[in-house]
Image: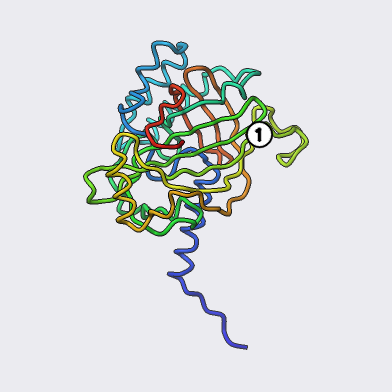
């Protein structure tokens, strides 16, 4: 029998790809590399704090103050201490879940703002965050939004990762993963006694959409990169996952992904995500 050999570089690349895809799927709101826009469009988190509760205001203040590129374990522990003082999600959490949301922070990626590239991190490519449905185009991720539609029993979940392609003067576009969400069942696929504040979801398609503020340049950027055909929805192969709503109100939401990572989002006005989704 011939000896079994191991192509270490190929195995390493495969493990890296699986890790990146798994983190996106389980987190639902945030990729490794970035987040939502810093103080633009929806405004800084502190602009919402004036309407929030005392506990919510503290969390939003920490979101604004969180170090961008040099956060350490003490910064994360301070944030998580404040997060765990938030009130539990109410019984009408599914109704509050509906609407447009901006990602502010995650325990996986830190402050939700564009960061300096990590020379030791995985490359920022569209195929890694689209379940291999999009080509391996190099991008710089700049933001993350959610749009949740339907009713209190379920509907459509859209996860946007916004990005620019290098050498395009910061012009942006967005990748949109879209699927279904539901309220699940305590005796369903999540196991007997699963929390009734759990949101099962499964992505079905991906597409690219232009910026609402610079539509023609955004489309031109995508077409120049060979991405024009992805304005139409393209099927993806993604397994079902879920998030647990830990806290939610008219102002903000805190949830935990299947991976265990925590996410903080602020509520936006309906229809205010600055990309052409409709």
Q: Residue at x 37, y 30 (%)?
A: 75
Q: Residue at x 60, y 29 (%)?
A: 150
Q: Which residue is mark 1?
A: 182
Relative depth, front residue between 202 and 173: 173
Q: Residue at x 43, y 32 (%)?
A: 103
Relative depth, front residue between 71 and 44: 44
Residue 188, quarter of picture: top right
Report the side of 193 relative to 93 (left or right).
Answer: right
* Colour scheme employed for the rendering of this structure: rainbow
Residue 197, quarter of picture: top right
Residue 105 is situated, as x and y percent measured from the top left of the image, at: 41, 32
Circle 1: element type: strand
- The N terminus sits in image quarter: bottom right
Q: Is residue 94 above or below residue 26?
A: above
Residue 131 is situated, as x and y percent measured from the top left of the image, at: 51, 54
Q: Residue at x 36, y 42 (%)?
A: 210
């Amino acid at each position: 029998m011939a000896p079994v050999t191991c192509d270490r570089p190929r195995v390493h690349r495969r493990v890296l790809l699986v890790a990146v895809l798994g983190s996106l799927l389980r987190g639902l709101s945030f990729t490794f590399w970035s987040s939502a826009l810093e103080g633009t469009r929806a405004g800084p988190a502190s602009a919402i704090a004036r309407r929030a509760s005392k506990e919510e205001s503290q969390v939003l203040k920490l979101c604004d103050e969180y170090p961008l590129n040099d956060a350490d374990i003490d910064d994360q522990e301070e944030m998580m201490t404040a997060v765990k003082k938030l009130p539990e999600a109410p019984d009408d959490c599914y109704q509050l879940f509906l609407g447009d949301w901006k990602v502010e922070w995650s325990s996986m990626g830190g402050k939700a703002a564009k960061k300096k590239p990590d020379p030791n991190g995985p490359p920022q490519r569209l195929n890694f965050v689209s379940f291999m449905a999009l080509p391996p185009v190099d991008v710089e991720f700049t933001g993350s939004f959610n749009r949740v539609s339907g009713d209190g029993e379920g509907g459509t979940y859209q996860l946007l990762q916004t990005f620019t392609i290098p050498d395009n003067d910061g012009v942006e576009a967005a990748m949109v993963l879209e699927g279904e969400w539901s309220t699940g069942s305590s005796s369903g696929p999540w196991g007997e006694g699963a929390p009734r504040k759990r949101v099962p979801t499964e992505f079905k398609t991906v597409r690219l959409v232009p910026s609402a503020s610079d539509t023609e340049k955004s489309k031109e950027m995508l077409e120049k990169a060979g991405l024009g055909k992805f304005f139409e929805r393209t099927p993806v192969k993604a397994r079902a996952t879920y998030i647990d709503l830990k806290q939610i109100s008219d102002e903000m939401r805190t949830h935990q992904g299947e991976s265990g990572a925590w996410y903080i989002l602020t509520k936006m006005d309906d229809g205010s995500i600055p990309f052409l989704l409709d």
